[in-house]
Structures are given as C-alpha cells and as structure tokens.
Amino acid sequence: MFVTNRLKLVTYALSVGLLSVLALPEQALAKKKPRDHSHLAFDADKRKKTKSSIGQRLSYSGSIGLSRLDEHNQKLNDGVDDRSLQIIGTLSFAFKAQISEKIRGFAHVELSQTDKTTHRQNYGSYSRVKIKEAHLSFGLADKHTLSFGRMRFAEPRRWGMDASVDGIHLGWKDDKTAWETALFRDAFDGRGTYAFLHAQRFSERSTSGTYALFESYREQQRLHVAGYFATRDKKRGGFNLYAAGVFGDAANQRPFGFAIDANLVSRFSDVRWKPQLVLGLAAGSPGYMQPDLNSNKARDGGQTQFHRFGTVFQPDLSNLLVATAAVGLRPSRSFSVDLRAHAYAQMQKSTVAPVARVQGITTGASRHVGHEVSIVGAWRPNKSTKVEFSAGVFKPGRAYSDRSTVKRLYLRMTKYF
C-alpha cells in the first residue's frame, strides 16, 4: 500500500496535534525591538534568539516540529504516475555563549527522523543529525566583527544563496553603511569553495548594495556579480530590483549570463485584513546560473517564507522568464495567507529542461513551460506555536513532452521552547 500503517499513525498524530493547537486562545505576540535595517549575508548579532538561561553566560532555546509533504508527478520523464509522501519529525536546539565582553559562541543543531514512501516502495525510517551552525565571533575595534566556523550564509533577501558554510567572515557596519568579506566552502552538499565581497547602504526607507562571489565548484569556476535596490513602507508597500551576471563556466556551454528580478508590492493597510498585491517579473538568459548555494526563498511581510518562483515548480532562472501575481491577506500579526500565480516561458526554445524541482523532457518546439497556482500561509496562535501550510498545482505547457499535472501539499506544526 502507498501509505503504510506507520505513516497513517503519524499522520493521525499530526492531525490531532493541529486540532489541539487550533483550540488554543490567540495571544498577542511580543513587541518588536527597533529594527536593524542592515542585511549582511552573515551577522552574528542576528542569529536565533535564545529564551532560557543557564547561568549568566549561557542561554538556549529549542523547537520540536512535525511535517508532512505530499508530492505527485514530480518526474515527467518516466511515464509513471509517481507519488511521494514524507513524514518528518525534527528536534532543534540553539545555544548562545557570551564567553567574554567581545567574544560570543553560537551553535544550532537539528535532529530529524524521516519516513518516506513512494509509489514504488517504502524506504522506511531514517535519522539524521545536522550541525547547521557552530561559530565564534569576536568584536574588534571600530565596529568590526570577525567570525569563523560553520555559519548560516544568506545574502540580502536570499535571492542568490542561503546555506550553511564553513569558513571565516569579517564584517563592519554603522548607521548607514555595511560591508563584509568571507572565504568559505559549502558545509553539506556540493562542497564548492567561495570568496565573497559585499557592500551595502541602507536607511529606514531603502536598501541598496552590490556583491561579488567567486565560485569554484566541480572543476568549474564562475564569478557572480549582483546589484540590488529595495524600498520599504509598512503601510504602502515597496519596490525591489535585482540584476546579476555570471562569468566563466556559465550555464549551457556559454561564458556569460545575466538575470533580473523586479517586484512591486502594494499594501492597503487601511482596509480590513490588510490586503496586499504583488506583481513580479524575473528573467534569466540561457547562460545564467545561480550559485550552488541558492535557495530562492523569500518573505513579504507574512508569517512564513516561500519559494519566490513557485511552490511546486521551484525553478532557477537559467533560460527562463517568470511572471508572478499574488494577493496576500494579513488579518492579524499572527496569521497570513497568500494566493500566488506564476507563468513560465523559456527565453529561447531548448531541449534542455529548466533547472527545477519538477523534472521532465522538453521538446524544443515551444517556449511555453507552464503555469502554477499555489496558496501559502501560516498561523501563530501563541508565541510558542506555529502552523505552516502550502499547496500548489503546476500545469506543464507545450514545451514538455509529458504535460501531466504536478501537485504538492505541505503541512508543518512547530512548538518552540
């Protein structure tokens, strides 16, 4: 059977847990501190908050989570109506140590238990221990911070990269400007090595900056350069623009590629449920390739993050045009929901399929890759509980030889302590 008895029990437990959470009374979330508008790729001051203290120098916090991921027809190239179901339990701890006035340590460890079943077989249950962060940071003279170890590296708005890396980082910032440089390697996956330089200027209303990333990955070398500009207004919305280029061993046997990504957010704060409208257009040339560290996850004022180019399809921008329209509702500080729609087309017709979570064979006869509709949301009934959900449908276009519908459903409950 596709769903084993064990999976049924775990799914039942998840459902009961969610019903229990839904019965809890809503509580006001803690007031936010004045926001630091700098967005360094790594900033020791902005790591996870710790809630409980052990003595005067050590503090910790943790979370326990349970999630369910259903995927249908992710592979369009095998002629099979494939299905996949994953039940994942996680236990996470974050530790912060104030070793001295200017020396701090931080560690983030995650333990996970996964049970996976597909249309072909049950893979059983397997566990994993992941050290996501473990670093020391030293406060130097003149607002400099030196850090080394395993760090969470995510450039502004996570447009190009978001990953755990092992390396050394030097950063500096004042009230209006910031810069940073780092040498590191990918901690888990491709084991690529990188050199990074980033400069930024920011204020309460806008942020602008530029960065360069040299990547050596699987005997290939690339230079990624990017610039960005973003405005912000909590009541009215804002505009953001990214432009990037890659040189060297770029994609599709080309030495150069470029990409742009523009988004306009209009908020109606005086209207009930505070709706917002998002319009976006992103495009990558046939030679464009994002760094191997990329995630393309984003957040636009809601309670959860999402994949900016599609919940189901989840593409990179190589030889791809993505048009986005979204409507979001923010009834309260504890609840948000977004309805998102994407349309995809190849910049040039190609038999090389887009780099995406959905795998398939393209014919080269059409540029129309397809379209997607999804819903993403989250609810925090109290300060220590969070429920996240997403669901989406991707319909392949004429560019694919197999045009079967692709579906994805995700549900997660997390308890923080």
Image (spheres, rainbow, N blue to C red):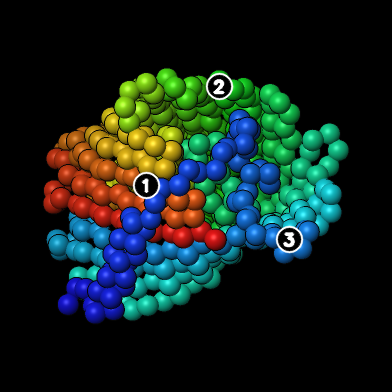
Residue type of the residue flagged with mark 2: Ser
Q: Earlier in the sequence, mark 3 or mark 1?
A: 3
Q: Spatial distance from mark 2 to mark 3, Cα to Cα?
A: 36 Å
Q: Is residue 205 above or below residue 35?
A: above
Q: Secondary structure at mark 2?
A: strand
Q: Earlier in the sequence, mark 2 or mark 3?
A: 3
Q: Which of the two discs, 2 and 3, sits closer to the camera?
A: 3
Q: Earlier in the sequence, mark 1 or mark 2?
A: 2
Residue behind mark 2: 206
- Taking depth in this image into account, of 39 and 78 the one nearest to the observer is 39
Residue behind mark 1: 378
Where's residue 248, x and y in %? Answer: 52, 39
Q: Spatial distance from mark 1 to mark 2, Cα to Cα?
A: 27 Å
Residue type of the residue flagged with mark 1: Ala
Q: Spatial distance from mark 3 to mark 1, Cα to Cα?
A: 31 Å
Q: Secondary structure at mark 3?
A: strand
Residue behind mark 3: 58
- Taking depth in this image into account, of 310 and 251 the one nearest to the observer is 310
Where's residue 394, x and y in %? Answer: 21, 45
Place residue 6 in its image quadrant. Answer: bottom left
Q: Residues within 10 Å of mark 2 (few under 14, many from 20)?
A: some
